[in-house]
Image: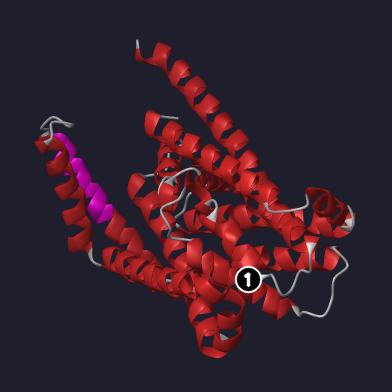
Amino acid sequence: MNRKNLISAGVLLLLAALTVSAIFKGNDMTAVFRAMKTLDPLYLCAAAATAVFFVSAEGFMICYLLRSLNYRTSAATCVKYSFVGFFFSGITPSATGGQPMQLYYMQKEGHKVSDSTVVLMTVAVIYKFVLVVMGVGILLFYHEPLALYLKQYLYLYYLGLFLNTALVVILLFIMISPRCFKGIVVGGEKILKKFRLLKSSRERTEKLVEMADQYHEAVLFFLKNKSKIAVVVFFTVIQRGSVFLLTWLIYRGLGLEGTGAFTVMSLQAAIYIAVDMLPLPGAQGITEMMYKTAFSMIFPGAYLTASMCVTRGLNFYLVLMLSALVAMWCHFLSGKRAGAAVPKML
């Protein structure tokens, strides 16, 4: 990792430490641990599997789209890209570091930058689009209960929904406008040259223009094959729903009943929408605070903190640790390939 990512990881650890400190400070942890012990192991395993599936599902979609562009790639390889993306998204503000690192490793393994960019942007746009549609649906048909549960955090929900909607519009415009994308690529190179971060190179500029043209061709391919986009949209709905279902599995695993799956999943979706675009690595701190407010009338007493610790532990920290291992493995393999390539160049 470079210095910027190391700083982001340090901020993440600091926020995690402050969050844990806040949890311990305001709670009877003996009662919390006692509540956690009542969790049914079967439900715990199902919830853990759901968390892993959530990240892996992105890899399946990347694989499907790459194969549509005639790349011979395995699902396991693409799942690796999704875990790398989750790790760098988790340690960078507003999840900005994931896609650049995915693009880096995809290019290292022989995928065209233009095709990889289209695939990753397609997955990102659909991911955000599905989240926005869910958010609008909750707002229209579940507004009163939402306001009741979220209380003072309702404004964050509005903000998150607005930011996600704006991002979807911007990404769609960039995708379908070849002139806009080419302008961003060439303009970005000019800015880097102006600050002397890049040297002038006619060959590089021509390659960037060629990449922009290839990018537009890939976009046109997907626009002409709407059935493939429909498949990704459908699978994204399942993916998004899986991480919301995780909270309900913990609810049932703790032996609680009386609140339906729809309510629990809707509240978890609302939290995701609210914190998704906030400039905090992993949305640390605010996610836990919103969780305790939103679910205060659903999880009684010590079960509230217990459920939060388990839910957050599975859908973020567990997956982040697995993703860190995958990212280190990718870095190791990349180094080995670079070393192996040296004799061939001599």
Q: How many labels sit on residues?
A: 1
Q: Which residue: 23% across, 58% down?
A: 181
Magenta residue check for 208: yes
Where in the figure is residue 28, as x and y percent of width and height? 78, 52
Q: What secondary structure characterizes most of the magenta part?
A: helix
In the rendered structure, which amino acid carries the disc numbered 1? Ala
Residue 52 shows in the view: no
Q: Which residue is mark 1?
A: 294
Tell whether 249 sits left or right of 167: right
Q: Which residue: 76% across, 69% down?
A: 299
Q: Which residue: 26% across, 48% down?
A: 211
Label 1 neighbourhood size at 10 Å, few (<14), some (14-19), many (20+)?
Answer: many
Position of 292 relative to 9 (above/below): below
Q: Which residues are magenta?
A: 203-214
Magenta residue check for 112: no
Where in the figure is residue 75, as x and y percent of width and height? 61, 49
Look at the image and name its color scheme. secondary structure
Position of 2 relative to 92 (above/below): above
Where in the figure is residue 275, as x and y percent of width and height? 49, 62
Quadrant of the frame with the N terminus: top left
